Image: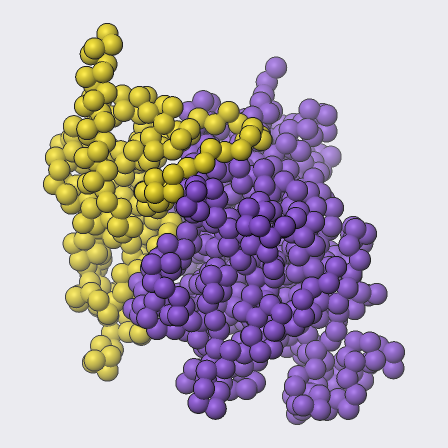
Chain colours: A yellow, B purple
Amino acid sequence: MAEQKKTVTFIIERQDSPTSAPYTQEFEIPYRPALNVVASLMEIQKNPVTKDGKKVAPVTWECNCLEKVCGACMMVINGKARQACCALIDELEQPIHLAPARTFPVIRDLLIDRSVMFESLKRVQAWVEVDGTWEVKDAPIQNPYTATTAYEISHCMTCGCCLEACPNVGPQSDFIGASPSVQAYLFNLHPLGKFDKEKRLNALMGKGGITGCGNSQNCVEVCPKNIKLTTYLAQLNRDVNKQALKNIFNK
Amino acid sequence: MAKNKIIVVGGGLSGLMATLKICEAGGEVDLFSYCPVKRSHSLCAQGGINACMDTKGEHDSIYEHFDDTVYGGDFLADQLAVKGMVEAAPKLIKMFDRMGVPFTRTPEGVLDLRNFGGQKNKRTCFAGSTTGQQLLYALDEQVRRWEVKGGVTKYEFWEFIKIIKNKDGICRGIVAQSMNSMEIKAFPADVVILATGGPGQVFGRCTASTICNGSAVSAVYQQGAAIGNPEFIQIHPTAIPGSDKNRLMSEACRGEGGRVWVYKDGKPWYFLEEMYPAYGNLVPRDVASRAIFKVCDHMHLGINNERRVYLDLSHIPADYLERKLGGIIEIYTEFVGKDPRKVPMEIFPSVHYSMGGIYVDRKHFTTIPGLMASGECDHQYHGANRLGANSLLSAAYSGTVSGPEAMKYCKEGKQGVALTDAELEAARQEVQAEYDKIRQMNGPENAHKLHQEMGDIMYDYVSIERDNNGLDKCLVELKKILKRWDNIGLTDHGNWANQEAMFVRQLRNMILYAMAITKAARCRDESRGAHAKIVLKSDYDAMTAEQKEKLVGVENIKFAADGRGHDADDELVFFKRDDSRFMKTTVINYDPATEEPIVKYEEFEHSLIKARPRNYAVAKKE
C-alpha cells in the first residue's frame, strides 16, 4: 500500500491578509510513514513550490506542541475542524483539503485569530477567586468523582473546533460557543469556585449566553478531547434557568 | 506614585507565576509571548510535580527531597537554591489545589502521589498524565483575572528581540515585534524577566514544542548575559521517535510500573532491572538513556536492530492505566496507531530539557543589571541532571522568587535612570534595520533545511555519548552553518505575518547557542549527570599518571581505530566525575569579536550535602 503512495497531494486554501480574497494552491510532497498534516506543512516550508512548479511563499499556520495538547494547530481538514498535528496522512482521503477555520477572522492562510474565545473566558469568570498565591491553609478535600469530571473538562485547550462546527456561532448569532460556556460549569464544580456560581450563571444569561445553543450536538462530535460538551451544556442550561427563576423571586 | 512596570517575556509556568506575584505586590506587568500564554510549552509536562506531602505513610521528608535532587543532579546544583525550592514545594501544591487544578485524588479525596525516577518515596503529585497542562491553566486563569482587574497587559503573538540598556548598562526595556503586523516597537520597563523556556529546537527533533528555540536566551547572551552549564542537556529515555518531533512518553509510565526491555537470546531482557537492582526501571533519566543507547548501539539488541526498545504497560490493569496515564496512552494510540494497554510501546531516548541556561544568582538576577531569568531558561536548581517532576516545581518556584525580587529591586531604587525617547527609538531602529536586511536575503540556502542539518549535527556529536574529537568537529561544522546562514534566501518577502523572516532571525540565535553548548561540553573533561564523555587515545596520552588513575580508573585500556577507549570487557571507557577540577559551574560569555563562547568556571554553594559517588545500582546512602 505504501508502495503506491509515493506522494501526498494537498489543496490548500490561502489568503494573503485579513482583507484579501482567498485562493487555492496545490502542493505535492513525498510520502513517508506516520506523516501528519503539520509535518507535511513543514515539508512545504523546506521547499515552497506548488505542484505546477511555481515558487510561492510558504504556507502560514500556527502550531506549538505537536501532540494535541496546546490547541494551536486547529484547521479545517477535508471539511472537518480538527488539530493538524494528529491528522495522520494514512487516514485521510487525498487530495487533502486544508482551509482556515473561518468562524474566526483569518490572519493569513491557515492562521486565525481566536482571541474572542479568551475574551469569553473573562465573561464567564473562568477562574477561582483565590485570595492570593500565598499560603492560606490546607486546600479543601474534594470528592474524587467530582474531581474526575473536573479533570475531563479541564482538558479543554481552547482550540475552537466546537465553535467552528457549531451552526450557532458566527455572524448570525452571538453565542459564545460550547468551550467557554462549559468552563463556567467547570468552576462551579470546585469547592471554592462554586462560591461565585451565581455570577457565572448570570453571565451566561442574555445576549450570547446559553440560550444561543441550538442543541445541534456538532460540538461533541468534533471535540478533540472527547469532552461530553452537550451533557454539560444541558446541565448548565438547567442551572441558568434555575438561577433566572431565583433572580425573579429575589427581586 | 506610578506603579512599577515589569516586563515578563514568556507565559509558561514561571512567567505566569512571576506575573501573579508582581501584581500582588502592586506592580504592573507587560507580558510578552509568541503564542496565547495558555498554549505555552509547560503544558507538555505530563507526569507530575514533586513535593514532600508525605501522605503515603512512607515518612517522606523535605530533607529527602533535597538530597534526592542534589544527588540526582550529580552535585552540581546550588544547594541553597535547591533547599529553598524543596521547602516551598508543599505550599505551592496547596496553592495550585485552591486554584482548581484537578489533581488525581485518593478515594478519600486527598491528593494522590506516585513514584518517579531517582526517588524511593512516593512524592509526585499529578493530574492524570497532563499535570503541566492543568498547572499552566490554573495560572493562566489567575493571570486573566488580573488582566480584568488591570494589572496585566498581554502582548501575545509578539516576539522578544533584544533588551535595551540605559547609559549605565542597566536593562530598562525590550524591543519586540508583532508576529502579524511585523511592527517593531520598543517597550520601557523597570525590570525585565525572561521566562522563555528551553532551547530544544537547537537539536531539531526533540520533545519540546516548536516555540522552544532558545532564541531569546541567545539574544541576551550576545548582549552580555552569561550562560551557566549549557552542556547539560537532558536526554529523556522514553519518547516516540518521529520525523517532526519526538513525542514524550512520561516517566510516569515507569513510575506506575512500566518495564523497559528488549529480546536477548529469544527472551525478554529487563535490562534496567538487571543493571540497577536498587532502582530498576526508576533510575534517573541520564542513567536510563545511556543504558538504552548502549543496548541498541553497542549491543545491537534494539527491536529489529533499530534504535528502539520496549516500554511495557500491558501487564497493568486497563482501568488503572486509564485513570493514571490516560492522556499519554491517548497520545501513543493516536500517533502510532497501537494500543499500549495491549502491546508494549516502542521508544527511544530524545533531547528533552536543558539543565543549563542563563546564569543567575539565587534571586534570579542575571549578570546584566535589571535583567532576570526564571524557569527552564535559567541555569538553577538541577545541576548536571534534572529529576523527573522537578521541572514543573522549579518553573513555578522560580517565578515565586523572580517576581517578588523584581519588585524589591524597584522599591530599593536600583533600576537607575529610565531610557530616553531617543534611546528607545535608536534601539527600535537597530532591530528594524536588522529585520529589513533579513527580508532582503536571497541566497540559495533554505532556513528550515539548515536548521535540520544543525539538529542532526548536534545529535551526532553532543547527545548521549560525547567525545572530544566529535565535539571539535561539531564546533567546526557549526561555524560552517553560521557562515551558510548568510546565504539564506527568503521565499516570503511579504511584510505581513512573515513567519519565515522571524525563523531566520531565530535560527542565527540558535546556531550561536549551539556553539555555547558544544564548547562547554568540549571543555568539561569529566562525566557528570547528563554529560558523559568517552576517553580517547589523545585524551589518555595527555593525562598524568595520577589523572589516568583518577579520571579513567581502568587498567589495560585499549583503543579502537576511532580512538575510543575500551576496557577488558570491551565496554567503552568514560571519564569519571572529577570534583577537584569540575565541581564548578560552567560560565560562558559571548565574545562579540569572534562570535565564539568564552568558557570559565565559577564556584557555587555546595556545603550542605557533601559530594559522594552517585550509583543507582545500590540504594542511596546519605
Residue B161, compared with residue B582, is above or below; it is above
A12 to the left or right of B283: left
Residue A196, compared with residue A106, is above or below; it is above
Q: Quadrant of the N terminus of chain A?
A: bottom left
- Most foreground residue, B220 or A16: B220
Q: Position of residue B535 (x, y in %)?
A: 72, 80
- Place residue A234 in its image quadrant: top left
Is residue B41 shown to the viewer in this render?
Answer: no
Is residue B266 shown to the viewer in this render?
Answer: yes
Q: Position of residue A99 (x, y in %)?
A: 22, 52
Q: Position of residue A93 (x, y in %)?
A: 16, 66
- Most foreground residue, B446 or B3: B3
Q: Quadrant of the C terminus of chain A?
A: top left
- Place residue B193 in its image quadrant: top right
Q: Position of residue B537 (x, y in %)?
A: 74, 86
- Place residue B525 in its image quadrant: bottom right
Residue at 47% over, 61% down:
B256
